[in-house]
Every structure is written in structure tokens, then in C-alpha cells.
Amino acid sequence: EGSLPASSSCPPRRHPAPTPVSTLLGSTSFFFSINASGAPRLLLQLNVRLLGRRPEIMDAANEVVDEVSGWLRVFADGTVDRTWTGPKEVSYLLDPVTPSNKPDDGVSIRDVVIDPDSGALARIYLPEDAPESGKLPILLHFQGGGFCVSRPDMNFYYAFYSSLVKKAGAVCVSPWLRLAPENRHPAALNDAYASLMWLRSVARAEVSEPWLESRADFGRVFLIGDSSGGNLVHAVAARAGEEDISPLVLRGGIPIHPGFVRSTRSKSELSLQSDSAFLTLEMVDKFLGFALPIGSTKDHPFTCPMGEAARPLNTLKLPDFLVPVADNDLIRDTELEYIEAMKKAGQKVEVLMNFGVGHCFYLNRIAVDTDPRVAQETEKFIEAITRFIEERR
């Protein structure tokens, strides 16, 4: 199947290899409620336990000093526990999917080392039924999770991106990114950009990746990222516009429900009630507090690229953008503000509005499988991304 790269032009990044999510699962109680469409909606009743920490041996140094309910806890000794407190019945959403060089449901997966010095990995999705003529566009995916949680091997990413690469006829590359609070900004941005530079190295035959060499079109690269990954799409595209990335060509950016906010609450943050475990106001505040440089506010250019502290948008060399927005997303209004600022700056931006759904709805396989409205909006979502890619040849 080909050997892993022996070298890389990526700058070294010192961080451990990914930890299987299955080793991080905690416990919780849970219940279902019925939403407006009559479909079951999973709500979490948080009941956190300290995984691997016996109460009788805990001292003040190991007390929880901060936490994001259901997602992570920070201890006084500086360690971070990312135990997910979800029920076992839905743990498959977070379980890691094992890579396989043989097509499973029409898609093959492999994990490759993109930086031998740090051991940094990227996951590659390759559809089995690819067009007979020509090579496949590349989707460079950046994970969400508020810069603090989630990994590319999670089941909900596999479910969506395996579907997307089949529909769009594309190959997807998804690098592991360092997480906050251990690694604050710009760690994730540097990792994301390093993955683009790795792609450039493959395109220049400086390192070898057989799947990409034989199947990928390096002249059609699209950046795509969900939530905080959408922030990375904007930032990586802006940085790439200032450098020589040839023979790569960025043909588009797809920041999905990007985590663009301001220090002052928007109307949607104040008025909308989140029905999703993927985004709450607590997550917005605490994740960004963990991720941004110490002393920064949410008006930082990384989280508010349309703000006064950011570089003027009309000075950026960006590809065409498709920005999906969900009308029940807590941060909908600042996403729309970003879109209007981009258009005013002369950037080419298309908007996809999904109705009756919330932040990153398409990753919630329970809702996709049980709620016809969510399933319909997910199909519309995939169709729009596919069209955006196909129109940029």
C-alpha cells in the first residue's frame, strides 16, 4: 500500500500521538425529550466521575479548578481530563474508527505520519468509486471542538466525511491538531498550516504519499472545517495567500458554522436556546478562554476576523468561500456579520442557510438518523458543498 513519508518540510511540533477516545469515556445518566418534529433528542444529564483518580488519594493539587460540563476538566496540577460523560448507548459517536486500506462502505482510510519529528498524523479518506478520468480534488479538513476537544478519528467525523468524499468525488486529508489549554493559540493554526505545507511537499515530490500521488489533484485544494475549524479555514487561507504554495492551488474555503464571536454577546447568543451538545454558551466562553493567548478577549483577530483588531479583510488574498450557517446556531449573528464584512471587502462569498437546525447538526448521527428534518437539511448541506467543489475546476 506504500510506505509512510521518510521526511517532511513541516516544522517540528512536539505533542503526543492521539489517544483513542474509547479510553477516555466516562459515565453519565441521560434521558430523551421530544423536539418539535416529534423525534427523540438526546440531552445529557452530567454526572462526571474522575477517571483513574481514586478520591482517597486525591489532594489539593489534583482538585478540579475549571471545567466545561461534559467535555473536559482542568486540575490544579495542570493536567486535563477529556473524559466524555456521554452514555454508553451513544459512545459510538466518539469512538475512534480504525483505518482500513480496504474499502468499507465505499471508502478506504489510512493514517499517515506528516511530521516524523513529532509523530503528527493525518487521516486520509479515499472513495472507491472515483471518476475514471481525471484526479480528485482535495479537502483539507480541520477539526472543530473549540480548539480543546475532538479528533479526526471520531466516528461522527467518519460518518460525515466518508459520505462527503463519495458524493463530491474528493479525497479528504484531516490532520490531528494540538489541543488547548495545554497548547494555546497559535498552536492549532501552526499545525493546520503545517498540514498544508505537507501537502505542498507531496505535490513537489519532496515526500511520498502514494494515495495522493496517484489520485489527488493538487491544483484543486479546498479548506474545510467545522466550528473552530472554520476559524482555521479563514486563517490558513489568509496565510497561504501571502506565501508560495505552488504547485498547490487553493480553489475554495468552506468554514462551516465558524466560531466567530465578539466580547459582547450577539442577539442570537442572548435569544436562542441551544438544543445541541455541540455548542453552549459555556463552551463558547470557556473553550475560547482556554485557547486564546492569556489576556486576550474574544475580540482577538483569530475569533473576530471582522473586528477592529484584525487585518482589513480587503487586504487578504483569499479563494472563493462557501459559508454554511444554521439558523438555530447560537453564534449565527456573528457568523452573518463576518459574511457581510467579507462581501463588503470584495471577497467572493456564498452563503448556505440551513433551517430548523443548530450548530454542526450534520455531525449528530442520532438526529440525522431519527429526525427527517435534520436528515433533509444534511442532504441539502452535502449537495451544496458538492456543487461548490464541482463548479471550481
Image: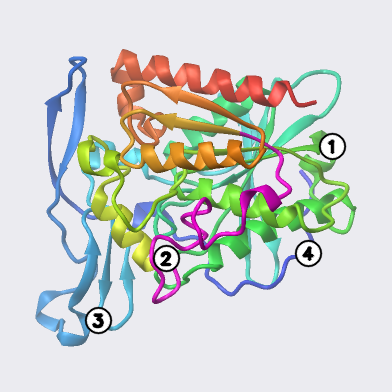
**Residue carrying label 1:** 214
Q: CA distance from mark 2 to mark 3?
A: 18 Å
Q: Quadrant of the C terminus?
A: top right
Q: Residue at x 33, y 80 (%)?
A: 78
- In the rendered view, would you say 249 is above or below 374? below
Considering depth in this image, is 291 or 90 the residue closer to the camera? 291
C-alpha gap between disc 1 and disc 4? 19 Å
Please name the residue shown 42% across and 60% down the image. Answer: 299
Q: CA distance from mark 3 to mark 1?
A: 49 Å
First-in-chain label (2 vs 3): 3
C-alpha separation, residue under disc 4 versus residue under disc 3: 37 Å
Answer with mark 1 or mark 4, whichever residue precedes in sequence.
4
Closer to the camera: disc 2 or disc 3?
Answer: 2
Q: Which residue in the structure is indicated by mark 2? A: 291
Give neighbour class at mark 2: few <14, some 14-19, many 20+ (Cα, 10 Å). Answer: many
Which corner quadrant of the image does residue 20 belong to?
bottom left
Main secondary structure of the magenta stretch? loop
The answer to whether residue 213 is magenta is no
Dot 2 amino acid type: Ala
Residue 8: mark: 4
User: For the magenta stretch, what is the residue range?
Assistant: 292-321
Q: Which mark is residue 76?
A: 3
Q: Position of residue 155 (x, y in %)?
A: 43, 39
Point out the tag, 1 or 2, that comes first from the N-terminus: 1
Marks 3 and 1, the one that precedes in the sequence: 3
Indicate the quadrant where residue 348 lies.
Answer: top right
Indicate left or right for 334 with 371 as reference.
right
